[in-house]
Image (cartoon, grey):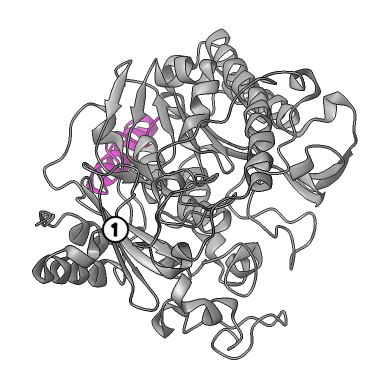
Amino acid sequence: MKFHRLFAVFSLLAILAAGCGFAGGPPKKENLPNIVFILTDDMDMPLLEFMPKTRELIGGQGASFDQFLITMPTCCPSRVSILRGQYAHNTQIFETELPDGGFEKFYALKGEKSTVAVWLEDAGYKTALFGKYLNGYPNTAKQTYIPKGWTEWYSPADGDPYEQFNYTLNENGKLVKYGDAPADYGTDVYAAKAIDFIQRSVKSGDPFFAHISVYAPHGPYVSAPRHANLFTNLIMPRSPSFDEEDTSDKPWVYSEEPPLSVNNIAKMEKIYPERIRSMQAVDEMVENIVKTLESLGALENTYIFFSSDNGFHMGEHRLLLGKNTAFEEDIRVPLLVRGPNIRAGLTVDSLSGNVDLASTFADIAGIDTPDFVDGRSLMPLLTGGVPANWRQAFLLERGLLDEAAYAPDVFVSAGYMSGLREPLDSPYLAKQDRAYRGLRTDDYTFVQYGDGTLELYDLKADPYQLENIAGNASPSLLEKLQAWLDALRHCEGASCREIESQPSPDLE
């Protein structure tokens, strides 16, 4: 009798579960793919040439994206866009430091309450970050502060981690100092801790998300001691835009740049091999991670992503070392992906960007993203298809352009902001004409600066962006581009994807 009653109870529970959409139960943890996300700092496309292991083990065994773009090409705004899947006008992070950005502002805005790490951890993933988080971390928080969503945490809390030596890591709430021994080299330390995390996670049967965020090749371009004598005879290449002969067609922020001096060029020639040397430990790290996954029998069920937070220019258009422009050198970065059902050697030409990574990771985990997410999953592209409604334009952003960009509901009591808005001496208010919004399509780049100046480049005919044709373009084309840009620069969530997917006007 008792058996029949128990059977009836269990049957009723099964029916109720089915009615609630859980007929098959939640996905089994062991069936969920793992995710490894390797993010470099200031890596431009040409540096990939000097990373043969990464090219072969990820790109050669998976997909290479030709048009992976960064909406705001500077560290903290890009990294927040990756974590939240949003354009910068929605994250409200416009800079690497206060008052317009940095960890401090993201922390004050409580943006960490809902990031891809939170979504994945809630879905049953073990999540871990190794290395760089956001510029300014952990200012305005405790040195042992760990953001929500991270099961394990290994991020510098003191010292100068860009130097790769003599820093302090917050290791799951414990501060651990590292010195100047070769074994303390930052990239190697993050790699070792990531591999340990991967090994433990695989053995426990838990799916994992390992975010390995190295500081290379960001200045001061410190390589591992074992690589100090490599590439000493390299000659820095010079593209057609290097020390551009005629910049009179450019907005004044570029046209007033003088030709590069002999000293400027000598400095770049010195830094060029230093940046390459600093990436060699990253290349070795990629190989060690792949070998570890293979030895554990987990490689076939793991997606590995490799990318950068922004690009980097060195002499193009007469510009010194840096980023933050809408030129291709700064906004276009590598994205290599290998994983289940991705064809080896696949090349993806469709427009994609850093706002898409959060949605992609969520898609791999089989979970939905919050409504605030602007980006879209790259998984359809990774299986070789292009959806009919795929984006036709990607939004480019830099700085604050108008009052609408301010967060109307932000109150920060840390002394950096007051009232309901940022202070009137915000650095970008003094540089309105240097801020911009723009569109990057398959065929062209269209940019509007704060003073109204326009740029338009035909990327098919002029891939090095030598001739700004905005002054010769038809008024009707400029009107169409302006309307498209105005709609996209204020978009939110699903509306971003709808506006991006509009047909692109042809150059006239």
**Residue 430 appears in the rendering:** yes
Q: Nearer the viewer, residue 337 or 66?
A: 66
Decide: few, some or many residues near mark 1? Use Cα within 10 Å; few <14, some 14-19, many ≥20.
many
Residue 310 in the magenta stretch? The answer is no
Provide residue 343's location: percent of width, then percent of height.
29, 17
Residue at 59%, 19% (x, y): give it: 289
Magenta span covers which residues?
A: 1-28
- Identity of the residue furthest to the bottom in this view: 419
Residue at 47%, 50% (x, y): give it: 82
Provide residue 417's location: percent of width, then percent of height.
64, 83
Q: Quadrant of the C terminus?
A: bottom left
Q: Is residue 330 above or below residue 227?
A: below
- Write down the quadrant of residue 210 in the picture: top right
- Write down the quadrant of residue 197 in the picture: top right
Q: Which residue is mark 1?
A: 468
Amino acid type of the residue that numbered disc 1 sits on in the rendered structure: Asn
Residue at 24%, 27% (x, y): give it: 383
Residue at 33%, 73% (x, y): give it: 453
**Residue 152 appears in the rendering:** no
Label 1 sits on a secondary structure element that is loop
Q: In this rendering, would 459 be left or right of 114?
A: left
